[in-house]
């Protein structure tokens, strides 16, 4: 009886931490996070249009890579990047936003492991300006590494090994070749145990419906629990906390009769804000699958659609080097593993430059049955920053 009382107290404290988390943030921090989250949802919509299966990506990893990219840019090249990211023409605010998140994630919750690392890799015949190297070191903790011009395989091996080491091996490689002159690389990893882990009695085999006519049996995590729950006119949402409750996974389930593709067409930052305002603490009948997802994304077309164009064509990266002309490749690889113990997730983004150019009512239980395609995200509840986001289709 005493153990149950202790468990109930811990649950209450964790849920209250989630509810009150944003109270200690400055107005400027809140506005910066909101601006970047608007970019996150534009990115989700653009990526979803290119994916027919389950997918996962890291908007924060993209932001970090673009932040380093913008630091090296000038004129229209820089303005397009900072504008799309939600910072107007303000590189300084973008840098401080990334610096805050770089160290915040690692210190926010001692029970959750977050690694956010950056590096600049350049051929040894490319002159990187001291001002740029200093800025990315100060704001992105990125060292600049010089690689032999005649050893492209050494560049491939260095970047792939660096990415693997900084993602705990979840992303073993990101490049097959390296014909560019400069590479900006970010690696982001997350390992979080559920605040209230599931046990073997919570695992059931149930059908997951990819479509009305296509289903398969899979392992589901199932229990009735007190959780943060939200409801809109076309979907339900539930949050599962990690560790001490700073980080959460949010599951978003469209209502019956609404496909995941239909829902994505109208899911944006404004609707996300409406969702978050509807959160309340309720007893929830929860069911969702253990799942893994892995995605590789070519980001250039997506970035161009969002408004970053000159960087991939006639660019000005003179603040980085007079030896580079434009970005020839921008790639991201991401992976997530969700099970009864918690979540492991990792992502790496690389840009390649070329040099020729309240208390719940126990009488009511809310169902959250994720037995068909749904969205998910991992976020820092205090800043609102979304680390990972995706769609599971089975």
Image (cartoon, rainbow, N blue to C red):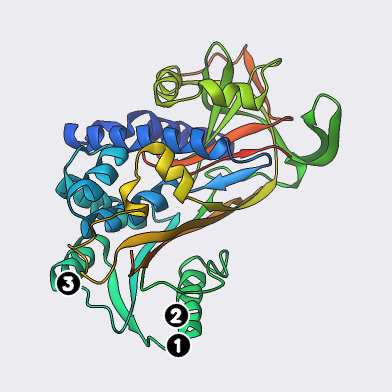
Q: Are marks 2 and 1 in contact (CB under 8 Å)?
A: yes
Q: Which residue is mark 3?
A: 129
Local crowd at mark 2 within 10 Å, few (<14), some, or many (≥20)? Answer: many
The residue at 14%/73% (across/down) is 130
Coordinates of residue 116 in the picture (x, y in percent): 38, 60
Q: Secondary structure at mark 2?
A: helix
Coordinates of residue 175 in the picture (x, y in percent): 53, 69
Local crowd at mark 3 within 10 Å, few (<14), some, or many (≥20)? Answer: some
Q: Earlier in the sequence, mark 1 or mark 3?
A: 3
| Relative side of 283 to 244, left or right | right
Q: Which residue is mark 2?
A: 155
The residue at 53%/74% (across/down) is 177
Coordinates of residue 310 in the picture (x, y in percent): 31, 49
Q: Which residue is mark 1?
A: 151
Q: Earlier in the sequence, mark 3 or mark 2?
A: 3
Q: Quadrant of residue 306?
A: top left
Front position among marks 2 and 1: 1
Asked whether the viewer can see residue 284, the reply is no
Look at the picture and state if 359 lies above or below 13: above
């Amino acid at each position: 009886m005493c153990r149950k009382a202790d468990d109930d107290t811990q649950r209450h404290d964790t849920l209250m931490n989630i509810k009150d988390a944003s109270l200690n943030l400055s107005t400027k921090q809140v506005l910066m996070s909101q601006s970047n989250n608007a970019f996150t949802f534009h990115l989700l919509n653009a990526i979803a249009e290119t994916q027919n299966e389950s997918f996962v990506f890291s908007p924060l990893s993209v932001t970090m890579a673009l932040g380093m990219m913008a630091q090296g840019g000038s004129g229209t090249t820089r303005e397009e990047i900072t504008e799309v990211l939600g910072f107007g023409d303000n590189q300084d605010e973008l840098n401080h936003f990334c610096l805050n998140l770089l160290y915040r994630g690692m210190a926010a919750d001692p029970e959750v492991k977050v690694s956010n690392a950056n590096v600049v890799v350049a051929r040894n015949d490319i002159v990187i300006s001291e001002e740029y190297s200093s800025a990315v070191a100060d704001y992105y903790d990125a060292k600049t590494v010089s690689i032999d011009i005649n050893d492209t395989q050494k560049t491939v091996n260095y970047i792939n090994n660096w990415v693997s080491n900084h993602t705990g091996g979840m992303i073993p490689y990101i490049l097959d070749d390296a014909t560019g002159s400069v590479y900006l690389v970010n690696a982001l990893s997350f390992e979080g145990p559920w605040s209230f882990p599931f046990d073997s009695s919570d695992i059931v085999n149930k059908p997951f419906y990819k479509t009305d006519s296509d289903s398969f049996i899979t392992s589901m995590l199932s229990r009735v629990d007190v959780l943060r729950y939200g409801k809109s006119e076309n979907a339900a949402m539930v949050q599962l906390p990690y560790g001490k409750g700073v980080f959460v996974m949010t599951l978003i389930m469209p209502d019956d009769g609404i496909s995941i593709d239909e829902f994505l067409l109208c899911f944006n930052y404004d609707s996300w804000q409406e969702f978050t305002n509807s959160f309340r603490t309720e007893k929830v009948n929860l069911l969702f699958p253990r799942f893994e997802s892995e995605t590789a994304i070519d980001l250039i077309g997506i970035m161009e659609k969002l408004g970053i164009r000159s960087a991939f064509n006639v660019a000005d990266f003179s603040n980085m080097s007079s030896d580079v002309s434009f970005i020839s490749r921008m790639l991201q690889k991401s992976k997530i593993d969700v099970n009864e113990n918690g979540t492991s997730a990792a992502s790496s983004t690389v840009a390649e430059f070329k040099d020729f150019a309240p208390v719940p009512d126990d009488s009511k239980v809310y169902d959250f049955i994720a037995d068909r395609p749904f969205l998910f995200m991992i976020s820092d509840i205090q800043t609102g920053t979304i680390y990972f986001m995706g769609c599971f289709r089975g």
